[in-house]
Image (cartoon, rainbow, N blue to C red):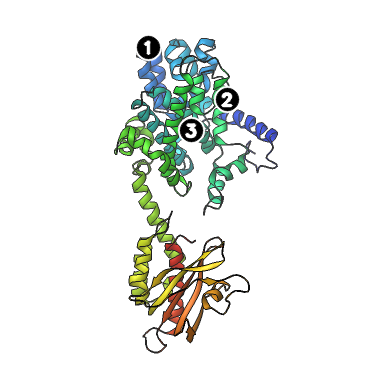
Amino acid sequence: MQPGSWQAGSGSADSSSRRLREAVKYVGRAWLPVNQVTLKHAISMLKTDSVDRQFILNEIKTDLSLYAFLLKRIGGIATDDSLQSLPPHEIFLKLSAEQCLDIFSTQHADFSVHDLASIKNVQLNQVRRTLISCSAAELLASSSNVDPELAFGCAMARQLGPLLVAWNYQSSVIRAEQASEGGATSFDDELYKLLGFTPEALGFEVVSSWCKSPVFLQGIGLKTLAEALPIHGNALAVGRDVLRICKIGESLARVSEPALYPNALREWQLVGKDLDRALGPRGPELIKQRIEDLFPHYVTLAPQLFHKDLSPEKVAKQVNLEFCRRLLDENLYVNKCKPELKKLFANVYEKVLQQEASMAAVSELISNLIPRSGFVYGCVYLLDPVKMVLVPRLKIGEGNPKTYKQVSCSCGGERAHPVSEAFHCSFPFKEEKVILNGDIVSHITGKFGSAERVGVLHLEFRDEGTEEISSDQRLVCFKAIKQAFGDALGLR
């Protein structure tokens, strides 16, 4: 059994620490698949000792495994304290050619047990998130007076753990994805239950075991370790800027995977303006281009994945469209309605919003769908949970002359009123030619929404037999409309 692949038990700190230590050893042997062409080219350039070291570092950056291996091994090569206080990229630039060769002086089998040729969607998705995070951090740093190499290295260190988990705990990642479907629990929480540690902690453990650079540790989020070291100048302030930059890139990466990170769009609203200020409206396009320029061999593995638009606005529209389609499919009563009504329901659901109420969808319901369904007047009531009354919020019907009053729904309240009756009932009910507020009406009334946010829909119709629609068809349409109101108002 792989270390950390079993279910977490008590979740104690000791158990988590033990699993993390075992995982560090395990992934240290298995590691990440390396691009052999890039490895050979980098070693060849180091052997000549005449190629600019920054140029070699740029070559190494194009392969995530090689750069991650540099993060892992460089501490053991640079044993001098003055070097270890520097960020990894600065250490690499100061090492001798022999020391740099020593970092990569292992056979392919020692690099990894994995092969890029066998990459699966689990790994591809994490590779994509890493490329977005690192490329965004590098570009943001360049426009923010921060060393882009430092930002790239910190972004890579923050993604190291998730990469290692994707390649070495594939089954756990898949199980976490499946368990978090529907949004009842988060993917991160489910993965922690399975591993007993967070992927980020795994990556931090690999780097922090040797790193003594305050700016780098602060930049990857290890504030306590950074502050415990001798600090020169504004290292911590720079590290905080780098950390902020890294988080913007990570947020952009999560936005593109709403199924895995359903709250990513809300999170992006808090940090997205920083990207616009730094890179302008073409920011996502610039990041996408940087990925294609710096990581061509990853892009060729799955061009359809890496060529996807990174614009959060376009992603949000697509996410909302898919969300609306799913809600429409879940409204099973729609399929029982006449074809012309199905089209009107589709128009309603096109306007529904995932994060908030959509008055455009409500307007479509009131102005087009409800009249075409045979209903003439009505009202939407919403619950005031403090006063325990149902408050009329939306009058339905062109020229509706009626006055709707709030209705008590507390125990011992107006149980004879159909709106109150509907609130206490699990299914809608129909009455014909009853006296209500001084008028003789025929109506269908029913409750919609969730346990926390409740509404009641009251719709009146003309006497049976005066319309083409049958009694059964009318009730089906009402149920479909009722559910659509809940979806349009966000009462789900």
Q: Amino acid at mark 2?
A: Thr
Furthest-bottom residue in this view: 465
Query: What residue would you read off at disc 2?
Result: 224
For label 3, the SS is helix
The answer to whether 170 appears left or right of 463 in the picture is: right
Q: Residues within 10 Å of mark 2 (few under 14, many from 20)?
A: few
Q: Which mark is nearer the camera, 2 or 3? A: 2
Determine crowd level at label 3: few under 14, some 14-19, many 20+ residues with C-alpha closer than 10 A.
many
Find disc 3 in the rendering and name its residue.
159
- Residue at disc 2, secondary structure: helix
Q: Position of residue 338 (x, y in %)?
A: 37, 77
Mark 2 or mark 3: whose residue is earlier in sequence: 3
- Tag 1: amino acid: Thr
Residue at horizontal 42 percent and vertical 64 percent from the top: 328
In the image, residue 139 sits, relative to residue 45, either above or below, namely below
Q: Nearer the viewer, residue 454 or 194?
A: 454
Q: Earlier in the sequence, mark 1 or mark 3?
A: 1
Most foreground residue, 66 or 357 = 357
Residues under labels 1 and 3: Cα distance? 32 Å
Give the distance between the C-alpha atoms of the residues marked 2 and 1, in whole angstroms.
41 Å
Circle 1 crowding by C-alpha within 10 Å: few under 14, some 14–19, many from 20: few
The residue at 37%/69% (across/down) is 365
Q: Which residue is mark 1?
A: 48
